Amino acid sequence: VNNPDLDPLTLDAHDVRTLLNESVDDPYDFVTRSANAGFFYLNTEGRIVAVKFDEIGDYDVQLKGSGVTITLAGDTLPVDIEAPEALFGHDRLLISTGGSVVSNVVYGLRSGYSHVLLENYNRGFLIGLLRDSSHQDLLEDLLAAFHPEHTLYVNNVQWKTEADISDPLHEIQRIVFSAGIRNIPTFGDYLIGTVNYDGDIVIPRTVRSVEKYAFIQFENVGEDMVSISVNGLGSTPLVIHNQALRAGVSITGAEVTVLNQTDWEARLSAFPAGAITVVKNGNQITYSFENLPNRDSVVGYSVSVSGDTHTIRIYSEEGLVGIVEVDVTTIA
């Protein structure tokens, strides 16, 4: 990672994957051919290596400096682990997305509820998943640390947890943002309680938009307000709704544009009508994006259904850029 504007120590695993794939025509999939090894980002060196899982804990990681080299040892699954990718140490982040049980579990946690790992989070499923892994104990500890009962998982569309936010005694220990996330959505349960999270929130550098009521459900921490910052460059463009945060809280570490409700709606309504066509064939609904402007910048979409209304949300490299509602009863 040779970029004078980036501090290698600030890069998360999904930052590295995103930055690499933004610079190449043929994206890397980060899937290893060996089930016994993974790709690791050594943040103190700013480089990527392929190392066997059995050896990465003792792998010599060096500190960059002016002729000074310090050898570090791995700190396997530290108690204060903040990222699934740091299960072998904060200075050797696993960036593989597949190819082994270890990588599947780590990337499954990073993917959140969109991944089968959390959709089927039960003891029987996990025992079957981990049975053939020589790192079963380590992975079980990792899964316990990021259990949905005390972890908030966030993707472009929703926040999700198995914690009962309405219970004042609940506790959120960790927040996991999905890989490549571009938008922080509204927290759906903001009216039924506040989130007990004793920590600061660091937004991934890939985020470009923050919706209304995204962080308003977070209580103050002690005498101080919860701190929200962006992991990355100060020039990162970030558009936020003026009701995204609790009063007195601000986002630091990025260039921020604040929009009121009218301007926010105008931004989304600027998305061209007819850019998405919907075809109905019996009970099957098909969405076509052939007429999307700047299709290369679109990173994904989501669909929610309420009765006969399908709401399509479009995400690009600029975050949430459009919301299209379609009444399927009007489709021939």
Image (cartoon, grey):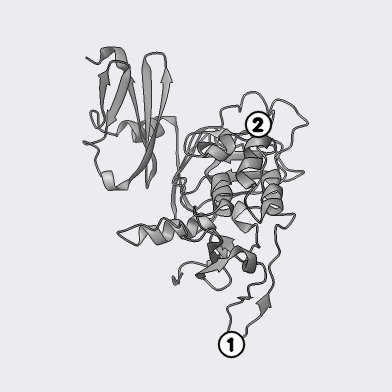
Q: Which mark is residue 162?
A: 2
Camera-near label (1 vs 2) is: 2
Query: Which residue occupies the foreground of this view, 130 or 207?
Result: 130
Could you tell me which residue is drawn at 29 percent across and 34 percent down?
Answer: 271
Q: Which quadrant of the structure image shows residue 323? A: top left
Q: Residue furthest front?
A: 132
Q: Residues within 10 Å of mark 1 (few under 14, many from 20)?
A: few
Element type at marker 1?
Answer: loop
Local SS, label 2: loop
CA gap, disc 1 and disc 2: 49 Å
106 up-or-down from 244: above or below = below
- In front here: 102 or 133? 133
Kind of residue at disc 1: Gly
Percent x, y of residue 149: 69, 35
Against 230, residue 59 (above or below) is: below
Residue shown at 44% from the left, 55% from the top: 236
Mark 2 surroundings within 10 Å by alpha-carbon count, few (fewer than 14), some (14 through 19), many (20 or more): few
State yes or no: discs 1 and 2 in contact (Cβ < 8 Å).
no
- Please tell me which of labels 1 and 2 falls first in the chain: 1
Instruction: Work out whether residue 200 can be spotted.
Output: yes
* Residue closer to the observer: 13 or 133: 133
**Residue type at numbered disc 2:** Glu
Q: What residue is drawn where x is 42% and y is 60%?
A: 19
For label 1, the residue is 67
